[in-house]
Image (spheres, grey):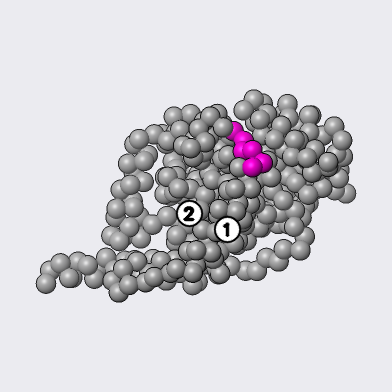
């Protein structure tokens, strides 16, 4: 009964995201009393995870459906398990062919849909799809077509630099853990993936000078009741929104210096935080859109340092392959 009640609360929270977020905050907190830090702030601390098989965008087969039924959830999770087992048992590599990537031994992308049962991470617009401009998709396609020409056409994710904001909060193929640390004037997020660290100042009212542009932007935070609201601006134009696993058609879509992201962190139970991000970038998207998902507390999860950049042989190998093709073409 308690699990069903929590699921109702989470689903109600997500529905409320398509209208002002504040309306859901009051609804979800009727029974749960949010713990406080010694400074009196809502306590969001702990180790949280978000591995899931729920896609970033709603599949065409689920058009018009915001949530899955219980039977659909069971079928989706069972089918995925069968497909993964079949794929690992039938790996074939041929000379000159695609050597493939990680198998399930190396991946940890989750085996369940989100506890809310939502059909996509994107909850607004109502169709669950990012309102991507054709011009932005063309830039993405150009980057993919020229990835062997220069490292600049590889994403900052593939180069192990950063996943940016909000990309660093989106589920990936592995390393889906986040440690939240609070002090009286800071909220810090330690990311397992690429071991990014965001130190968000709670007593800062304005962004840094507009001339300063950063991969993860500059964040200004405030409390709205029990919700931490984080607004990020001052981006450079070399990042991206979505990572490999969370992206699909959004992977490698660029961002501009006009990108603005508003995140909300609301604790709705002892083991759940609802996180959302509203993304505005007028040159890339025709309108703002909102991503939302529950983060699940897991105190037994162990985070290790992820030395991605130090062990990244992919980029030089990709470029070497490109040069080899050029030499072969001259023979």
Total numbered labels placed on residues in the image? 2
What residue do we see at 43% from left, 69% from top?
A: 91
What residue do we see at 36% from left, 41% from top?
A: 137
Residue 113 position in % (x across, y down): 62, 47
Residue 289 in the magenta stretch? The answer is: no
In the image, residue 11 above or below residue 185: above
Q: Residues within 10 Å of mark 2 (few under 14, many from 20)?
A: some
Query: Element at badge 2?
Result: helix
Q: Residues within 10 Å of mark 1 (few under 14, many from 20)?
A: few
Assign the magenta stretch its main secondary structure.
Answer: loop
Residue 296 position in % (x across, y down): 72, 51
* In this rendering, the label closer to the viewer, 1 or 2: 1
Of residues 323 and 87, the one drawn nearer to the viewer in this rendering = 87
Query: Element at badge 1?
Result: helix
In the image, residue 85 above or below residue 276: below
Examine the rendering and report whether any part of residue 215 can be seen: no
Q: Answer with left or right where residue 197 lies relative to residue 184.
A: left
Of residues 40 and 95, the one drawn nearer to the viewer in this rendering = 95
Residue 116 position in % (x across, y down): 68, 41
Examine the rendering and report whether any part of residue 65 can be seen: yes
Residue 20 position in % (x across, y down): 67, 26
**The N terminus - image quarter:** top right
**The C terminus - image quarter:** bottom left
Residue picked out by circle 2 = 244
Label for residue 64? none
Residue picked out by circle 1 = 81
What residue do we see at 45% from left, 60% from top?
A: 158
From which residue to which does the magenta span run? 66-71
Q: Could you give the CA–CA distance between mark 1 and mark 2, rounded to whole angstroms? A: 20 Å
């Amino acid at each position: 009964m308690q699990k069903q009640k929590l699921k109702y609360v989470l689903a109600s929270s997500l529905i409320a995201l398509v209208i002002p977020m504040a309306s859901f905050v009051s609804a979800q907190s009727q029974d749960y009393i949010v713990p406080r830090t010694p400074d009196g702030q809502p306590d969001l601390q702990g180790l949280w995870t978000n591995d899931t098989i729920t896609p970033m965008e709603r599949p065409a087969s689920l058009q018009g459906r915001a949530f899955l039924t219980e039977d659909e959830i069971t079928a989706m999770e069972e089918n995925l398990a069968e497909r993964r087992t079949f794929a690992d048992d039938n790996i074939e590599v041929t000379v000159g062919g695609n050597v493939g990537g990680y198998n399930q031994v190396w991946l940890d992308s989750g085996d369940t849909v989100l506890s809310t049962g939502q059909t996509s991470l994107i909850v607004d617009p109502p169709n669950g799809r990012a309102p991507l401009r054709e011009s932005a998709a063309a830039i993405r396609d150009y980057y993919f077509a020229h990835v062997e020409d220069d490292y600049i056409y590889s994403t900052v994710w593939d180069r192990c630099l950063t996943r940016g904001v909000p990309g660093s909060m989106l589920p990936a193929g592995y390393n889906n853990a986040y440690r939240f640390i609070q002090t009286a004037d800071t909220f810090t997020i330690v990311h397992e993936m690429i071991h990014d660290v965001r130190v968000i100042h709670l007593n800062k009212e304005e962004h840094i000078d507009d001339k300063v542009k950063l991969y993860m932007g500059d964040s200004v935070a405030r409390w709205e009741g029990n919700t931490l609201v984080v607004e990020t601006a001052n981006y450079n134009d070399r990042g991206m929104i979505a990572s490999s696993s969370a992206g699909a058609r959004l992977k490698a879509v660029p961002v501009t210096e006009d990108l603005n992201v508003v995140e909300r962190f609301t604790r709705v139970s002892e083991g759940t935080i609802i996180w959302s991000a509203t993304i505005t970038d007028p040159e890339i998207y025709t309108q703002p859109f909102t991503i939302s998902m529950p983060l699940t507390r897991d105190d037994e999860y162990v985070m290790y340092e992820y030395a991605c950049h130090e062990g990244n042989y992919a980029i030089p190998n990709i470029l070497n392959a490109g040069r080899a093709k050029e030499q072969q073409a001259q023979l």
